[in-house]
Image (tube, rainbow, N blue to C red):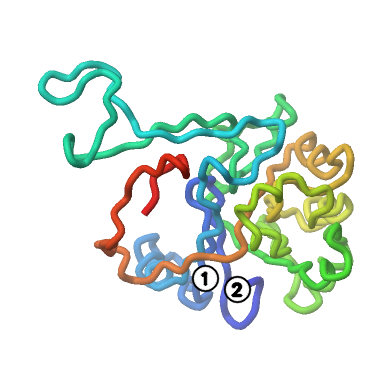
């Protein structure tokens, strides 16, 4: 993933929960005035490098202890369908020509997520009330990996932001800032959700980013903003109308040009009762 203004590249972040990725494109290709959106796709997005920033949701991924575990199971017929399926019968490729999965999600706080302010403050917008302008923004990635080598509980500070700006330039107003910690490299170990010390984003750093740099929102790899007893960073964000991304996956999946048709696997999907989900 390219971060900031290195070379002549910009990084754009699509912020919706289901379409979370970083797109690296040439800034020169979109510099022309009055360029149509189809032309933007053809000249920039079509040949861009896409990086998936999300975790796959499974029944066993790390989740806050206050939530119950979700369950997956084969989808079943909800009623009798003459000459096709009996009520309660699981759909199978062999008999019905298709399979589907039934999801029982105990919370919406799963995996990679976008926290709207209504998560804590009901007077502010909920996830469905976030404006479409969140969709595509410049993305800045600030690393605190080195700091974490000596302090596993390190939280991003204003000094870290200023150091990044000294090297790459001022953070653009309205951009998205993700904090790289490599915490996600241990995913999906359930123990991650039980850690008392983990990488964070300090309150003063958050205030600097939002008030001084006027960013849209920030994101981090762990499932909480910081390890303070009262989660001071998240409290400040939510009660001041700011959104944040949590559970961001630092290592991306590259999507090449051959994305249609998609490749066939020699390992067909099937439901694994032990795993509690469909696997290959």
Q: Residues within 10 Å of mark 1 (few under 14, many from 20)?
A: many
Q: Nearer the viewer, residue 137 or 188?
A: 188
Q: Secondary structure at mark 1?
A: strand
Residue at far bottom of view = 7
Q: Earlier in the sequence, mark 1 or mark 2?
A: 2
Position of the C terminus, as image quadrant, is bottom left
Find residue 109 and report its horizontal and vertical position in percent: 62, 37
Q: Are marks 1 and 2 in contact (CB under 8 Å)?
A: yes
Q: Which residue is mark 1?
A: 24
- The quarter of the picture where residue 278 lies is top left
Find residue 92 and report its horizontal and vertical position in percent: 24, 37
Q: Is residue 213 above or below residue 71?
A: below
Q: Secondary structure at mark 2?
A: loop
- The quarter of the picture where residue 154 lies is bottom right
Q: Residue at x 79, y 57 (%)?
A: 199
Find residue 115 and report its horizontal and vertical position in percent: 66, 40
Residue 51 seen anywhere in this rendered image of the structure: yes
Marks counted in the figure total: 2
Q: Residue at x 71, y 45 (%)?
A: 193
Q: Which mark is residue 177?
A: none
Residue at far left of view = 83
Residue 245 seen anywhere in this rendered image of the structure: no
Q: Which residue is mark 2?
A: 2
């Amino acid at each position: 993933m390219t971060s900031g203004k290195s070379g002549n590249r910009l990084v754009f972040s699509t912020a919706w929960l289901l379409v979370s990725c970083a797109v690296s494109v040439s800034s020169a290709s979109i510099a022309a005035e009055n360029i149509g959106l189809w032309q933007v796709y053809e000249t920039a997005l079509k040949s861009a490098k896409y990086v998936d920033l999300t975790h796959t949701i499974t029944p066993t991924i790390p989740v806050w202890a206050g939530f119950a575990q979700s369950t997956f199971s084969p989808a079943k017929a909800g009623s009798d369908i003459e000459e096709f399926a009996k009520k309660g019968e699981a759909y199978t490729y062999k008999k019905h020509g298709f399979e589907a999965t039934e999801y029982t999600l105990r919370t919406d706080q799963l995996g990679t997520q976008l926290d709207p302010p209504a998560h804590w403050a009901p007077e502010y917008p909920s996830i469905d009330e976030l404006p479409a302008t969140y969709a595509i923004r410049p993305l800045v990635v600030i690393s605190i990996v080195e700091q974490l080598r000596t302090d596993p509980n390190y939280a991003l500070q204003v000094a870290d932001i200023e150091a990044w700006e000294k090297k790459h330039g001022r953070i653009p107003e309205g951009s998205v800032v993700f904090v790289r910690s490599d915490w996600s490299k241990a995913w999906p170990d359930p123990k991650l959700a039980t850690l008392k010390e983990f990488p964070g984003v300090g309150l003063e750093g958050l205030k600097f980013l939002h008030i001084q740099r006027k960013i849209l929102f920030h994101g981090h790899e762990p499932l909480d903003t910081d390890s303070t007893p009262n989660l001071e960073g998240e409290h400040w964000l939510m009660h001041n109308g700011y959104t944040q991304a949590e559970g961001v996956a630092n290592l991306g999946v590259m999507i090449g040009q051959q994305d249609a048709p998609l490749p066939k696997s020699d390992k067909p999907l099937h439901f694994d009762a032990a795993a509690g989900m469909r696997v290959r």
